[in-house]
Image (cartoon, rainbow, N blue to C red):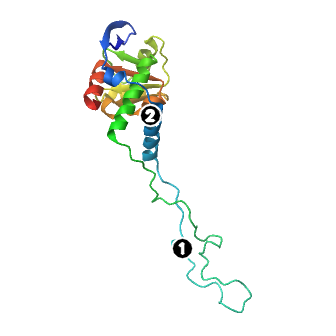
Amino acid sequence: MLKVKVYNIEGKEVEELKLDSDVFGVEINSALVHQVVEAQRANARLTLAHTKTKGEVRGGGRKPWRQKGTGRARHGSTRSPLWIGGGVTFGPRTDRNYSQKINKKMKKRALYMGLSDKVNENQMFVVDKLELPEIKTQKLVKILTKLPGKEAKSTLIVLAANDKNIIKSAQNLPKVKTILADSLNILDILQYKYLLVDKEGIKKIITTYK
């Protein structure tokens, strides 16, 4: 039976929570996790680099010199890739597609593995209720530092619902990020050392992904 300790925002243990072993207790397959992570990175990649072909470069409509009799090589346009300021042959283009297809079953399985790894490494902290009465970064820092063995750095806070006070309070912390439970993904889980979620967040994860 898979159980984790549940803390209050003062860092004191209040109960134990039984976790769904199908979500939080699966065997880790590093090859599958790597494949899903690479696909997610590729799908988020922006194609910014763009070069112009000789047909897109401005100017060059006039033949630079006559075809014969000059002793120089023949040219039809100064926009040729042979000329400085001309078009580029086989350069990067914004129409290039880096996206990779990954099926939902693999993506879901990789997410289970990421969550299971956090549980195995004691890097997932569950609190009974996570809320702030106001937007206050220092109050959020106190909650993070009071958890046993927990540092305020590198934490992914998983929210069951959109909580403006927590989201705004976390924005000033460079290594803390908030994410909704129904938007959870393996890449964010791996990028942060700790996972902080309340009991409602656990329920939301199970109902969303199982």
Q: Going 33% across and 26% down the picture, which residue do you hit?
A: 159
Split into 4 quadrants, where in the image is the C terminus?
Answer: top left
**Whole-percent x and y of residue 123?**
45, 19
**Whole-percent x and y of residue 33?**
44, 34
- Pick whichever, 168 or 98, lies toward us: 98
Q: Going 65% across and 70% down the picture, which residue do you hit?
A: 84
Q: Can see residue 120?
A: yes
Q: Does residue 46 sit above or below 116 in this rendering?
A: below
Label 2: how many Cα within 10 Å (few below 14, some 14–19, many 20+): many
Q: In the image, what residue type sits under mark 2?
A: Val
Whichever of labels 2 and 1 marks the residue nearer the N terminus, that label is 2
**Whole-percent x and y of residue 161?**
28, 28
The secondary element bearing badge 1 is classed as loop
The tag on residue 33 is: 2
- Pick whichever, 71 or 21, lies toward us: 21
The tag on residue 58 is: 1
**Whole-percent x and y of residue 195?**
41, 23
Q: In the image, what residue type sits under mark 1?
A: Arg
Q: Does residue 33 sit above or below 86 in this rendering?
A: above
The secondary element bearing badge 2 is classed as helix
- Quadrant assignment, res 90: bottom right
Q: Is residue 172 left or right of residue 206?
A: right
- Quadrant assignment, res 208: top left
The tag on residue 85 is: none
Q: Is residue 187 left or right of residue 198?
A: right
Residue furthest to the bottom? 69
- Please say if the residues under marks 2 and 1 sit with CB atoms less than 8 Å apart: no
Q: CA distance from mark 2 to mark 1?
A: 47 Å
**In this rendering, the label closer to the viewer, 2 or 1:** 2
